[in-house]
Amino acid sequence: MLHYTGFVSAVCEALGRLGREDEGIELATAGVERARRFEDRCSLSELLRVKATLMGRRPETSHLAEALLVEAVETSRQHEALAWQLRCATSLASVWMKEGRLEHARGLLRPVYEGFSEGFHTHDLRAARRLLEAMR
């Protein structure tokens, strides 16, 4: 399941970079449905995150992205999946930062980031650190 999630997530992100958000959203939606069907909450949080990211890029669906990210963060918390929680919190904090909701963004991301004791050279932790620094 985890390999499936990583693959689907990477393909969805690649489709987004190519401007093919509709295809990415369709693939992410299928992944979300699969994760729900198999009660795979760990994968669900990442698939919701990538779907929200793609939806956030499109004017007609951007208003739905925040709710998906909130669900993704909560799902990762419930599953105690710190790595997925970091990704989801970073994505949601980025949305809130763009909206000027800096205190909410910091309050969400900082405790997750501080939950790590190693791996600070990884892409996800570097991205979270950059976002926290941008909020100063």
Image (cartoon, rainbow, N blue to C red):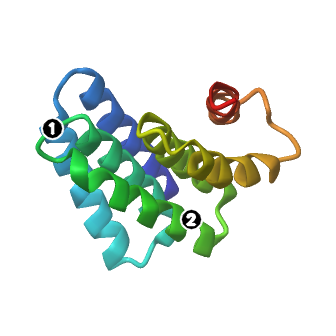
List x then y, in percent, for residue 107.
67, 53
Residue drawn 61% across the image and 31% down it: 131
- The quarter of the rendered structure image containing the C terminus is top right
- In the image, is 39 to the left or to the right of 79? left
- In the image, is 56 to the left or to the right of 46? left
Which residue is labeled 1 in the image? 59
Dot 1: element: loop
State whether residue 28 appears in this view: yes
List x then y, in percent, for residue 103.
62, 48
Q: Where, by quadrant of the figure, is residue 123 drawn?
A: top right
Up the image or down, 31 lies above or below 99; here it is below
State if disc 1 and disc 2 touch (CB < 8 Å): no
Can you tell which mark lies on residue 76? 2
- In the image, is 113 to the left or to the right of 7? right
List x then y, in percent, for residue 33.
26, 68
Q: How far apart are marks 2 and 1 (CA)?
A: 27 Å
Choose the circle earlier in sequence order: 2 or 1.
1
List x then y, in percent, for residue 70.
44, 62
Q: Mark 2 packing: few (<14 Cα in 10 Å), some, or many (20+)? A: many
Q: What's the amino acid at mark 2?
A: Ser
Instruction: Pick out the residue farthest to the top.
Output: 18
Q: What's the amino acid at mark 1?
A: Pro
Please give the count of numbered marks on the rendered protein: 2
Can you tell which mark lies on residue 18? none
Dot 2: element: helix
2 or 1: mark nearer the eye: 1
Relative depth, front residue between 98 and 94: 98
Residue drawn 50% across the image and 45% down it: 101
Relative depth, front residue between 40 and 106: 106
State whether residue 86 appears in this view: no
